[in-house]
Image (cartoon, rainbow, N blue to C red):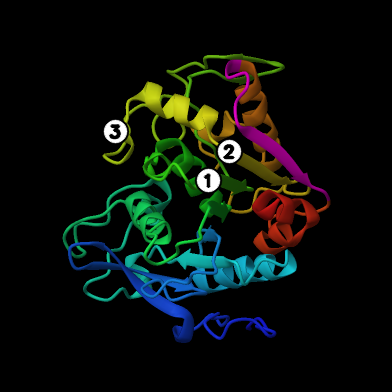
Amino acid sequence: MDVDPDDGPATLCTVANATCAERVEIGGGVFLPVFRTHALEDGDDSVTRGLIVIHGSNRNADDYFLSGLLAAAEAGEKFRTVVVAPHFQTSDDGPAPDEPFWSSGGWKRGHLSRTEGPSPRVSSYAALDRIIAILTDRSRFPALTEIVVTGHSAGGQVAHRFAASSRAEETVPDVTFRYVVANPSTYLYTQAERASGDEFASPDVEACPDFNTWHYGLEDRNSYASALSAESIRDQLARRDVRILIGDADSLSASLDTTCGANLQGPYRFARGQTLVRFMDTFFPGHGHVEMVVPGVGHSNRQMWLSAVGLQSLFG
């Protein structure tokens, strides 16, 4: 499937195959494959927004690239938006010798790539930082004023934890950032309290010993997240522009994290999103999280992003 470029610039790449594929150097001689609408090496002086679209557990970056492109087209923004869909591979994806790969859970949490892969090992979140550095390079995209980082399902998990732990936003003060977190299985909680009825309280640690470890909470953080103090992460996440985009029909248990630490966040994805916003309201008045509900939609990245609410979250 491709997207009709209409009468726009010939540089707009709109097919989810090798034609629109590129590799981004994220370490010394280590490369991350991506799909992109504009050649990142060349840049484009008409682009004003970077839209980074993070795939789910199936690692189908090609489908997510098309979803991002369709959303930009529906919003009338495709010629001003460079869409980038990174591919975080595991060993099952057949990575090239110079392409890092992660465990099936590691890329979601910002862990370093696997030791069996190329060196240097790289955090998946550091790879996103590198993409942002390219998009905010004025010699490539001189007119860019906004970065949107979004993901659905497992990609939504990445978007929320990346919003909390990345320092990229502070490096480019003339660019605005937003993080659109769509239907993730779990969120990052920056304090130990979890919902208990209508209130929040610290749960029984003996009954659920890992409920507050990274990636559910701030204990035992990995090397990427440990570069910041817990207080810095807490402050960053509270002040950043985070859209919690949740479908009110996403109430099934398919591929849902049902570990103890996850279940403390709620029974299913829609409820977990609402509870996370209530947690932020309770402990961080004036925070930047905004709850955005997509009526009648369940666990579908394309239906979420192409809805009126989804388009508002990405481009409004």
Check residue 291 for magenta coloring.
yes
- Select label 2 or label 3 by which is in front: 2
In x, y percent, where is residue 293? 76, 43
**Mark closest to the chain's N terminus, 1 or 3:** 1
Q: Which residue is mark 2?
A: 241
Q: CA distance from mark 1 to mark 3?
A: 22 Å
Horizontal and vertical percent position of residue 210:
41, 28
> In the current view of this chain or complex, which residue is farthest to the right?
296
How many C-alpha atoms fall within 10 Å of the one at disc 1: few (<14), some, or many (≥20)? Answer: many
Dots 2, 3 in contact, CB < 8 A: no
Residue wearing tag 1? 177
How would you rate the neighbour count of disc 3 (Cα within 10 Å): few for under 14, some for 14-19, many for 20 or more?
some
Q: Quadrant of the N terminus?
A: bottom right
Identify the image quadrant of residue 315: bottom right
Above or below: residue 169 compared with residue 218: below
Magenta segment range? 283-295
| Relative to 158, residue 104 above or below | below
Mark drawn on residue 226: 3
Q: CA distance from mark 2 to mark 1?
A: 7 Å
- In the rendered structure, which amino acid carries the disc numbered 1? Phe
